[in-house]
Image (cartoon, helix red, strand yellow):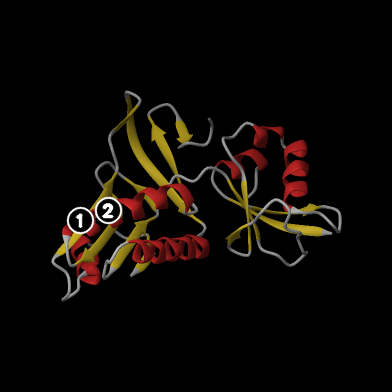
Amino acid sequence: MIALTTDPIDVQDVINKASSEEAGAVVVFVGTVRNMTNNKEVVKLDFESYDKMAISELEKIVKQAKEQWPVRNVAVVHRTGELGISDIAVVVAVSSPHRKEAFAACKFVIDTLKQTVPIWKKEYFKDDEVWVSAYP
Amino acid sequence: MKLKLMLFGITKEIIGQTEFEYKVSETVDVSGLKQALKADYPELSRIASLAIAVNGVYAKDDESLQENDEIVLIPPVSGG
């Protein structure tokens, strides 16, 4: 399952979608909104996405993960819109017969998502707002 | 020819729109488009990166562009 949503993410549902009878392990990454960046208090985040390409780039990443590790199912859900502190922005769940591959593949998916998927977050502070990573 | 450009993230603020028509030469390629945009909007040269997606796929600099392409400016991504 690969999806974008503006609703709160149901983590158990993502785990269920990643599960497999052949799996001995399901590794789940949950990305949450942190309350502080560079010692400044974060008020909220706003995520936007180029939807169709975000989905197709996620599909490429999942395909690469399945080619590199013997994983069974991979489920990725990313939320967009306004998120508050501790809200869940993204969930990546990977199942495989053994945990070593599941950990490695899960890390690969979230690391690569952060490099290639056309989703952008704006961080809002009390007196400032910043597109994350926009400037060197 | 006129290209329809879609903007996301900081590029929306730099150019001041979410979508706009941009006039370019008939034979422009991706690198030519980037050069022209940076000349018109110098702030685009200061952001960490600017990629171009054509019809939903990251485009190489030497790719040529047609009038009906869906072209999107991709500033540094920050999902996850």
Locate residue A113, reporting x and y percent. Answer: 41, 52
Q: Which mark is residue A100?
A: 1
Locate residue A53, reporting x and y percent. Answer: 52, 62
Q: Quadrant of residue B1?
A: bottom right
Query: Which chain is home to disc 2?
Result: A
Say whether residue A130 is left or right of residue B60. Answer: left
Residue furthest bottom as drawn: A21
Amino acid type indicated by mark 1:
Lys
Locate residue A13, reporting x and y percent. Answer: 22, 67
Are tags 1 and 2 found on a single chain?
Answer: yes
Q: Quadrant of residue A12?
A: bottom left
- Does any portion of residue A9 appear in the rendered image? no
The residue carrying mark 2 is A104
Q: In the image, what residue occupies the spot 52% across and 58% down?
A: A50
Q: In the image, what residue occupies the spot 53% across and 30% down?
A: A136
Mark 1: secondary structure: helix
Query: Which chain is home to disc 1?
Result: A
Say whether residue A26 is left or right of residue B46. Answer: left
Q: In the image, what residue occupies the spot 27% across and 66% down?
A: A71
Mark 2: secondary structure: helix
Q: In the image, what residue occupies the spot 41% across and 62% down?
A: A64
Q: Name the residue nearer the viewer: A105 or A28.
A: A105
Distance (Cα) linking label 1 and label 2: 6 Å
Locate residue B78, reporting x and y percent. Answer: 44, 44
The answer to whether the residues at label 1 and label 2 have Cβ atoms under 8 Å apart is yes
Amino acid type indicated by mark 2:
Ala
Q: Residues within 10 Å of mark 1 (few under 14, many from 20)?
A: few
Say whether residue B47 is left or right of residue B3. Answer: left
Whether A126 is drawn above or below A32: the answer is: above
